[in-house]
Image (spheres, coloured by chain):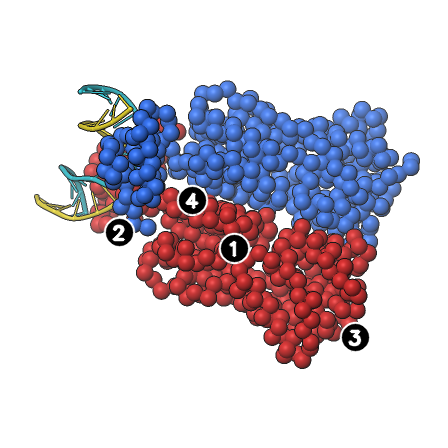
Chain colours: A red, B blue, C cyan, D yellow
Amino acid sequence: MKQKINIHEVARIAGVSKSTVSRVISDKGGSVSPKAAAAVNEAIARLGYTRNTFAAGLRNARSYLALVVVPDIANPFWSEIVRAVQDRLEGEGYSVVVGNTDWSEDRELAYLKLFGTGRFDGLIINSVTDDVDLILEAGIPAVLIGERSETAQIDTVGTATHQAATLALQYLYDQGHRRIAVVTSETGSERFLSRRYTAYKDFIQAKGLELDPELVFTAHLSAEGGERLTRELLSLPGWKDRIDAVFCGNDILAISIQNSLRAAGVVPGKDLSIIGMDDIPAAALTWPALTTIRKPRAEMGRMAAELLMKKIGDPSRTPEKHLYPGTLVIRDSVAHLRS
Amino acid sequence: MKQKINIHEVARIAGVSKSTVSRVISDKGGSVSPKAAAAVNEAIARLGYTRNTFAAGLRNARSYLALVVVPDIANPFWSEIVRAVQDRLEGEGYSVVVGNTDWSEDRELAYLKLFGTGRFDGLIINSVTDDVDLILEAGIPAVLIGERSETAQIDTVGTATHQAATLALQYLYDQGHRRIAVVTSETGSERFLSRRYTAYKDFIQAKGLELDPELVFTAHLSAEGGERLTRELLSLPGWKDRIDAVFCGNDILAISIQNSLRAAGVVPGKDLSIIGMDDIPAAALTWPALTTIRKPRAEMGRMAAELLMKKIGDPSRTPEKHLYPGTLVIRDSVAHLRS
DNA sequence: CTGAAAGCGCTAACAA
DNA sequence: TTGTTAGCGCTTTCAG
C-alpha cells in the first residue's frame, strides 16, 4: 500500500491549501466555504485519499481505537456484547480490539498494560479483579461492564443482578421447588459473589426457608466447571432428597451441568430442575431447552459504547450507571412439582 | 494519560542523544555500547516511558496492529484460532483486532475497506467471498486461513479438507453405514463447496456405492442452519430407509442437528448417525458426545501468525501453503451397524 | 474564510 | 559507537 496521496496532494488538486483540506476532513466545524469544501471532497474522491491515522494521532493524541476486554469471547453472551460495541463504535470511526482474559487476573493486567502503551483511546472492560482503582489512577477513559463495583466514579453498564436472581428463584419457588442449590463464580471478586449470593440469602429468608450452606456452590463458569460441579453435587450424600433445583451463574454452566447430569443417569428438567442466566443462543437448543434469565446484551453493548464515546469526548463528565433488568425465559428445564 | 515523557526526556536523563535512545528501543540491532544501553534502559524504567506508537508509525509506516477476520467468532473453532494468533502476535509487540463477518460478503468488504485506512500492518482472513484478487491487488500483506483458494500467490494455512472428509466417511463406512448424507456450506465460494463435495463423490465412487443427489444438502453452518436442515431432512419421503448417517460441515451444525433430531423423536447416534468436523469443546459435552474430525486449531493459528510476520518483514517473499491433516475423534454419535 | 508556518515524537541517513 | 539533522503527514494557532 504505497500511499503517496497525502493532504498536500489533495490540496494541490483541489487548488486550496493543506489547512483547508485539514479543516474539511476533520469535521470539527472549522469554517470552510461550500465551494472550497466541494473541491476538496472531489479531490479526495478522485485520488482515493484516506487520512494517515498516525500523523493525525500524533497531533491530537487520538488513535480511534478502543479496547474491549471480556473474560470469555467464546461465550456468546460476551461475543454478542462485543458485537454490539463494535457496531456502535465503528459507526463512529473507531476500530475495536478485543481482549480475552480467560478469567485470569494476569491476562487482565497484561491488557491494562497494553492499554498503557497509549495505543487506545478508551477501554470497555468486564474486570475479573474488579480493580477499579488501577483504572481510575491511570486516568483511563473506561466503561465497566457488569454490576460489580460499588464505585460511582466510573461509567458502568450492567444487569440488576439482585433482581434477575430473584426472578429466577421466584420462578423455581412458584413451580414448587423449595430445596434450591445456587452456583456462583469461583473467580471474580468477593463482592460479585456476594451479590448473587445475597439475592439467594434474601430470598430464602423472605420465604421463611432454611439456608443450607451445603447447597451453596462455587464453580468456574464454563463447560469444564459444570462437569466438575456436577461430580461435586452428585457426591453430596443424599442429594436426591436435599436438592430439587439448581440456580446457575450462567447458561454455559447450566448447559454443561445438564449434560453431565444426563451422562450420570439423572434427567435434567425432571429429576432435577436447572435454571440458567444469560439466555445465550444455545440455551434454546439444549435438551431439555433451558429455562433462563435473559439479559439485554445488544442494548448493554450499545450503551457501553455510547458512554465511552461521551467519556472520551469529555473526560471530566460525571459517570453514569445503567442497570438493565433481566427477564424470565421459560423453557423445559424446570419441572413443575406439586408439593 | 498526559505523557510528557518522550524520547528526548529519556535521552536527557540517560545523558545520551535521542538517536541512541531510539536505537535501544527499536531492537533493530543498531550498534550501541552496553554502557549507553544500560543508562537508557534505566532512564526508561525510571520515567516509565512508553514509545509513542503514532510517531513511530508515522516514520516507519508500521502500526503494530494486525487484523484478523473470521466468519463467526462465537464458534469456538474460530475463537481458538484467534486466540492462538493473538498469543503469537502479542509476543511480537503486535495487537490484534478481530473482525467478524457473520458469513456476510458485505461485512467482509467493510473490513477490507477498514484495512485500507492504513491502520493495520497485516491481515489474517478466512474469506467468505474468497476474493483473493482484491487482496492481491491492494498489495495487502495477508495470510489466508482455509483451504479455499487455488492461488499459490498468497500464504495459506488450512486443513486438508479432502483427507479430513475422507477420514470421516471411511469411519462411517467401517461402522457399516452405506447411505451417507453430506451437508456442506450454503455460503462460501463454489470452489469450497466442491472441495468437500468432491471428497464425498470420490469416496462414494471408490466404494462402488451409488450417489443419491437428494442426500447432498447445503446449510448455514450454524445452530439455526442445523434446525432448518433437520426439518428438511425429516421431510424427505422415506428418509428412514434412505439415510443412516449424516456427515456435517462443522460441529456447530452437527450438534444442532442432534438436538433437533431428538426434539423430533429421532435418537441421534442410534436411529441416525452423526459425524461432525472441527472438534470444538462442546462436541465432548453433547448427548450423545459427538464423533468428529479434529483440526489443529492452535497450531494453525500460530502458523498463520508466523507467516504474517514473515510476510510483513519481507513482502516479496514466496508464499507458503500449510495444510494440516485432520484426526478422527471417536465418541458416541455414530452407531455400529452390522449390515 | 483561507494560507503560512511551526511542530507532535520518532527514525534514519549522514557525519563525526 | 555516537550525535546532528531532516523530515514522516497532519493539525492548529496566527495573520491576513
Q: CA distance from mark 1 to mark 2?
A: 41 Å
Q: Are marks 1 and 2 in contact (CB under 8 Å)?
A: no
Of discs 1 and 3, which sits in the foreground?
A: 1
Q: Quadrant of the C terminus of chain A?
A: bottom right
The chain that hosts pointer 4 is A
* Mark 2 or 3, nearer chain start: 2
Q: Residue at x 72, y 71 (%)?
A: A179
User: Element type at marker 4?
Assistant: helix
Dot 2: few (<14), some (14–19), or many (≥20) neighbours within 10 Å?
few
Q: Quadrant of the N terminus of chain A?
A: top left
Q: CA distance from mark 2 to mark 3?
A: 68 Å
Look at mark 4 in the image and give the residue it sits on.
A114
Using the rendered view, name the quadrant where residue A174 is placed: bottom right
Look at mark 3 in the image and give the residue it sits on.
A338
| Relative vertical location of residue B260 with respect to residue B85 in this rendering, above or below | below
User: Element type at marker 1?
Assistant: loop
Could you say where residue B129 lies in the image, as x and y percent from the top left? 56, 35
Disc 2 marks a residue whose amino acid type is Gly
* Mark 3 or 4, nearer chain start: 4
Look at mark 2 in the image and give the residue it sits on.
A29
| Relative vertical location of residue B106 with respect to residue A285 in this rendering, above or below | above
